[in-house]
């Protein structure tokens, strides 16, 4: 094993008397973090029922430990850092007694970004092998750690705990982290039992004596010991790489969240209490993430569907200094984090005047986008932004001529639908009937040379976040991509 503690090897990569146990702990972090995301997004408005469960949560004063020099917040989005700890303290010692004296690590790091208005959320995972600069951190005992020029990202937790990981993530993303949640894994089996099992899909039959996983090819609902075996398996599924496992674990988290959000778990007080009780027994947060704050976050996300929960791996590439490690890929990583940082706030909806016709929702508006700007690919880019705000969109291609002004035209019967689109494109010319080529019920958006990145107002989804390669949605087909 490498002697440099900031260049950490892993028990599942090196010789160890209990490799499966350490590996299982790391992977279980994904599941517990998935539960935490569900707890935040869930209906917490009946807090009185769950007061005792919330009393289990431990806290740390992150604001005092991180200090005042932090990224500026540009909007009303919420960023919560989810950490999976493999600490062997207390009852956790049962899962690897030979490692109880080792320094704990956070082998699972996910940034949960909740867009303004609660219409969508992103779980951004950071690979365990990601090499980054770690700033000097203050420990809870008052001591400070020296900065690390290049170290694996999870060693920040080993150096000075969860608040040091918060400081590190802020330094590499320029995103203000509002809160953190740290979980360990004692309650894992209870969590999967409390939710009634988690659906998975196996691309092939697995008969792995090491993990004790024995399942046929296809769909299964797993819980308890069987779910524990599934998240521990390494060589029986996928290519055995960390990044490959991340994708499988993201699917598991998505399936857990989808089950909770679509099967009535969050609206059933008895089921929700079982889920929260199982999770809070192994939960630690910053001191400002109080139950009342969780309630506010939860109420703000009422109505969010699992299809709006997206799992993404931070843009990465191989480390030139070591093919077994990775680094953030630039400029893709900076562009992505900047999009999260500038995720647009949601303007307050104006109430319609008395007697006014009801506004038609974006989901019922058909839009055809034409490019009259002369900029290649502009229609496709704008079409994707409109889809993210709920419109039914198709690309019409290049317009017959270049236009200096963005225009909205509508076919027969689509005058009210045109008003819905116009509210999102306030700089466009007033909607007008199509003089030629208009289709019944269709609204045409003609992109002119005046179009800029701010021409489209943010909708309930909080504004466009570019789709990332390999991203997963919580409601994706379980068997796709296996």
Image (cartoon, rainbow, N blue to C red):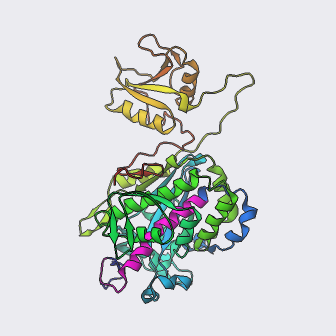
Q: Is residue 25 magenta?
A: yes
Q: Looking at the picture, how far across and down is residue 477, in whole percent?
A: 42, 49
What kind of secondary structure does the magenta stretch mostly adopt?
helix
Q: Quadrant of residue 102?
A: bottom left
Where's the N terminus, which quadrant?
bottom left
Q: Looking at the picture, how far across and down is residue 160, in whole percent?
A: 49, 78
At 54% from the left edge and 39% from the top edge, which residue is drawn? Answer: 458
Q: Is residue 270 positioned above or below 282 on the image?
A: above
At 48% from the left edge and 49% from the top edge, which residue is drawn? Answer: 475
Q: Looking at the picture, how far across and down is residue 183, in whole percent?
A: 54, 71
Q: Quadrant of residue 362?
A: top right
Tell me: 123 left or right of 303. left
Q: Is residue 51 magenta?
A: no
Q: Between 155 and 150, which is closer to the camera in this rendering? A: 155
* Residue 182 visible in the current orientation: yes
Q: Is residue 456 positioned above or below 142 on the image?
A: above
| Magenta span | 13-39
């Amino acid at each position: 094993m490498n002697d440099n503690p900031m260049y950490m090897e892993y028990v599942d990569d090196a010789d160890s008397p209990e490799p499966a146990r350490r590996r299982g702990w790391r992977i279980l972090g994904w599941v517990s973090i998935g539960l935490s995301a569900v707890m935040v997004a869930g209906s917490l408005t009946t807090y009185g029922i769950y007061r005792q469960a919330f009393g289990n949560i431990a806290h740390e004063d992150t604001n005092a430990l991180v200090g005042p020099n932090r990224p500026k917040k540009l909007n009303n989005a919420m960023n919560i850092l989810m950490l999976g700890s493999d600490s062997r303290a207390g009852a956790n010692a049962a899962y690897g007694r030979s490692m109880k004296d080792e320094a704990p690590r956070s082998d699972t790091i996910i940034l949960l970004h909740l867009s303004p208005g609660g219409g969508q959320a992103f779980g951004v995972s950071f690979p365990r092998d990601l090499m980054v600069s770690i700033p000097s951190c203050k420990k809870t005992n008052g001591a400070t750690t020296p900065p690390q020029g290049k170290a694996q990202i999870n060693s920040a937790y080993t150096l000075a705990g969860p608040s040091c990981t918060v400081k590190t993530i802020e330094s590499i993303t320029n995103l203000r982290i509002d809160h953190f949640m740290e979980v360990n894994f004692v309650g894992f089996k209870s969590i999967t039992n409390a939710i009634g099992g988690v659906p998975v899909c196996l691309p092939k039959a697995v008969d792995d004596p090491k993990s004790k996983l024995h399942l046929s090819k296809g769909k299964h609902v797993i819980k308890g010991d069987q779910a524990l075996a599934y998240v521990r398996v390494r060589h029986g599924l996928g290519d055995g790489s960390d990044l490959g496992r991340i994708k499988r674990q993201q699917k598991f988290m998505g399936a857990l969240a989808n089950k909770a959000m679509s099967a009535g778990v969050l609206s059933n007080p008895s089921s929700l209490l079982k889920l929260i009780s199982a999770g809070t027994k192994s939960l630690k947060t910053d001191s400002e993430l109080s139950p009342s704050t969780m309630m506010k976050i939860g109420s703000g996300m009422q109505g969010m569907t699992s299809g709006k929960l997206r799992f993404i791996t931070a843009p990465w590439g191989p480390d030139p200094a070591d093919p077994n490690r990775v680094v953030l890929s630039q400029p893709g990583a900076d562009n992505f984090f900047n999009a999260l940082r500038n995720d647009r706030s949601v303007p307050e909806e104006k109430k319609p005047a008395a007697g006014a016709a009801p506004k038609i929702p974006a989901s019922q508006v058909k839009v055809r986008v034409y490019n009259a700007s002369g900029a290649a690919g502009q229609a496709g880019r704008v079409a994707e932004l409109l889809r993210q705000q709920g419109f039914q969109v198709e690309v019409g291609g290049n317009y017959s001529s270049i236009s200096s002004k963005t225009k909205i035209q509508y076919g027969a019967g689509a005058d009210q639908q045109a008003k819905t689109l116009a509210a999102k494109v306030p700089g466009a010319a007033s909607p007008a009937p199509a003089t030629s080529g208009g289709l019944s019920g269709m609204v045409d958006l003609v992109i002119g040379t005046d179009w800029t990145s701010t021409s489209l107002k943010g909708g309930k989804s909080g504004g466009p976040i570019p789709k990332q390669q390999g991203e997963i949605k919580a409601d994706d087909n379980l068997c796709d991509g296996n």
